[in-house]
Image (cartoon, rainbow, N blue to C red):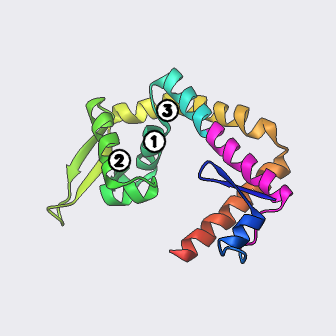
Amino acid sequence: MWFHGSGRKLNCQLATLVRVADVQWLSEPEQRAWRAYLEATSRLSDRFNRDLQRTHGLSMTDYEILVRLSEAPGRRIRMTQLAAETFSSKSRLSHAINRLESAGMVERVGCDTDKRGWYAKLTDDGFARLEQAAPDHVRSVRRHLLEALSQDDFLAVGESMAAIVAHLHAEE
């Protein structure tokens, strides 16, 4: 049995010598599933990003920001909350907001109750751009993900991912 990490192969017997015998190594089926998960998530992310870039000049990060803003009351969210909702660092979100602001899709609005706080607000142009991109993005999701699975398998994947999210939240 092999563990693949850090670009090196580590034999289980060697692992025992380096005092990691208590590690429950992945079985062959678990290893195959793990690798399939890594490759699938990487390839899906790449495909969705590429499709949005090619058809609408948006990255997946840009699209997710526009979606979150479109769903928020008044189409605006505090920057710190938006960073958390999009799983972005404050710095990464700030760069994305700068790009979207330069393109006229988002504007920054000061917070009345906290002089240090800022909102990101979706503009009418940003909403129109999202309305144009959304159908193509949904078609991309269907083509690259849903068509590869039965409806039951897709729903099972969703339930599995929700369980993982709940587990990760519980560890925070």
Please rate how many residues cluster around mark 1, counting C-alpha atoms within 10 Å: few if below 14, some from 14 to 19, many from 20.
some
The secondary structure type at the circle numbered 2 is: helix
Q: Nearer the viewer, mark 1 or mark 3?
A: 1
**Magenta stretch containing residue 36, yes or no?**
yes
Q: Is 3 situated left or right of 68 in this image?
A: right
Name the residue: 82% across, 47% down. 151
In 3D space, how far apart are the residues under numbered discs 1 and 3 (Cα atoms)?
16 Å
Q: What residue type is labelled 1?
A: Thr
Residue named by callout 2: 92
Q: Earlier in the sequence, mark 2 or mark 1?
A: 1
Q: Position of residue 56 (x, y in %)?
A: 48, 24
Residue named by callout 1: 61
Point out the stretch of residues depicted in magenta.
23-44
Q: Where is residue 165 in the image (x, y as percent from the top left)?
A: 61, 65
In the displayed structure, 147 sits above or below 153; it is: above
Name the residue: 45% across, 57% down. 85
